[in-house]
Amino acid sequence: MDADDILLDAEERMEKAVDVLKNALAGVRTGRANPGLIDSLRVEVYGSATPIKQLASVGAPEPTQILIRPYDPGTLKDIEKAVLASDLGYTPQSDGRVIRINVPPMSTEVRKKMVARVKDLSEEAKVSIRNVRRDANKAADKAEKSKEMSEDDCSRAKDSIQELTKKYEAQADNASKAKETEIMDV
């Protein structure tokens, strides 16, 4: 494996770690209603657990309300049951065509818990990025030992790996700081 392959693999894996963080942050509640709050919801319908996005359009017409409009009106009751059974703590209200979920405002204590959760998610992403760095450095050392790469090339590869690590850790920090600000500013 040459230095370019090692760097490319490391960069792809670090980028995935940041993407996982961003997806996780989308599901963290802020003070506003956000369709991302129920993205992880799976509905038992047609004999299997189906993601809610495949069964309905989900929107937030108001800052305190999520609106779920099923594509098939027959799945309305199943979606309603799934929201009630979830650990999200929301009570759905159905009018026979759409489901409305009112998102109550968050207390300061709940906001602080959400910020702590964001910090935990960010730290998990950084640990993942550092694990990728460790693996890439090991691959560079292995390539040097097997004479596929010179000592200078190995050193340059490790410097590049460190630069990538800093870049993706900064992206993780920026994403989490933006989410923290969003949580506390509402």
Image (spheres, helix red, strand yellow):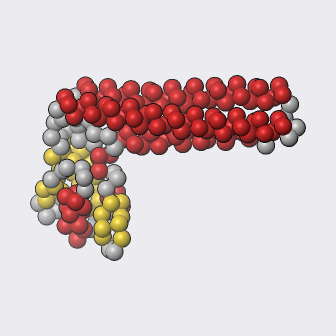
Q: Quadrant of the N terminus?
A: top right
Relative to residue 50, is residue 105 depicted above or below? above
Give residue 168's position: percent from left, percent from top: 55, 31
Q: Is residue 182 visible?
A: yes
Q: In the shown orientation, is residue 106 left or right of residue 114?
A: left
Q: Residue at x 25, y 52 (%)?
A: 87
- The residue under the point 34% across, 53% down is 40
Quarter of the C terminus within the rendering: top left
Q: Quadrant of residue 29?
A: top left
Q: Is 134 situated left or right of 129 in this image?
A: right
Residue at (26% x, 30% y) in the render? 112
In the displayed structure, 36 sits above or below 144; it is below
Above or below: residue 83 compared with residue 135: below
**Residue 38 point in image, percent of width and height:** 29, 50
Name the one closer to the observer, 172 or 123: 123
Identify the residue at image location x=19%, y=67%.
77
Q: Position of residue 81 (x, y in %)?
A: 20, 63
